[in-house]
Amino acid sequence: MTQYLTYNISDVEPYINWAYFRHAWGVGNGSSEAARQLHDDAMTMLEELRPRYHTHAAFALSDAFSDGDDLLLGSVKLPLLRQQQPAKGSSYCRSLADFVRPLGHGEPDKVGIFATTVDRQLADDHSADDYQHLLAVTLADRLAEATAERLHEEVRRTIWGYAPDEHYEPRQLFSEPYQGIRPAVGYPSMPDMSINFIINDLIDMSQIGITLTESGMMVPHSSVSGLMLAHPRAVHFSIGKIGEDQLADYARRRGMTVERMRHFVKTAERAQYADIQQHRQHCCCHAAH
């Protein structure tokens, strides 16, 4: 059963990773005058946001097996990709499916499915001023990620409860000292935006205000979706370059043509590139003023 959770800004604020916020603005490690001014402006805006807006999460814990490079989540199949070249220092090509118990090997494993977002109007309400709008957008991105961090902590300690004695300060979580991983859709280990359609079928993201475009992108843009895996040896990794043979096999398992599958994978690459370019352009414009 899916749980839908609402958080106050103050609930998730301690989980904001300010290093990524500064990176989005290109202001380095935070010691410069520009970085200090930006942080002061962000804190002023957060003070305004706290009583007016919320963040939201959806989470479901599913029985799961792996079947080759596919995950079986209850009655739903979620195909995944595998590295075609092992990571440096490794001789093994990884898939996220490797961290879930194989079909036919005892009792079902568990996999978490999640999405987090912010109130849709949070950034829109600050659109009259370019700098304030970009500040709101970058804060919204961080708040969505912070909500995922807060949710993941609750999942490990209570909702799933596989690490009930875990205790870290929010700042410590940024280095991921805990057991398990939280791979997100569109990121290196799941570079296929169409997975969002499967996740939406499982947890109905509309219940927390998320809609999907034809390309599988989430609206609001400041949203995160993905899986939570508890295997003690689970690690993040990048699929890397997807060969034509694997793309064809993956398209077959996803029930799509190769060209349509290529579109969804490329959409993820373009989205990440566009984010980088947008932040750089706006930062340059702000610096010029």
Image (cartoon, rainbow, N blue to C red):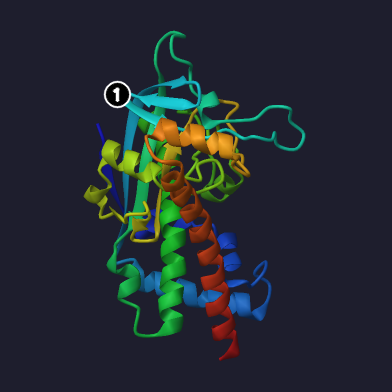
Residue 50, image x and y in percent? 34, 66
Q: Decide if residue 157 is in sight here.
A: no
Judging depth in this view, the residue of 258 and 109 nearest the camera is 258
Residue at x-position 64% and y-position 69%: 30
Rate crowding at label 1 as few (under 14), some (14 to 19) or many (20 or more) other CA atoms within 10 Å.
Answer: few
- Outermost residue on the left side: it is 207
Amino acid type assigned to the residue bearing label 1 in the image: Ser
Quarter of the image holding residue 26?
bottom right
Report how many numbered discs are placed on residues in the image.
Answer: 1
The residue positioned farthest toward the bottom in the image shown: 289
Q: Residue at x 28, y 68 (%)?
A: 121
Q: Is residue 200 visible?
A: yes
Q: Quadrant of the N terminus?
A: top left
What is the x, y in percent for residue 133? Answer: 40, 77
Q: Is residue 191 above or below residue 98?
A: below
Q: Residue at 55%, 41% (x, y): give it.
A: 189
| The C terminus, quarter of image | bottom right
79 relative to 191, above or below: above
- The residue at which mark 1 appears reads as 75
Q: Residue at x 50, y 36 (%)?
A: 248
Which picture quadrant has residue 29?
bottom right
Q: In the image, residue 37 lies at what x, y percent?
A: 57, 79
Location of residue 245 with respect to 44 vertically, above or below: above
Left or right side of 180 for 30 = right
Counting from the top left corner in percent of width and height, residue 141 is at: 44, 61
SS at badge 1? loop
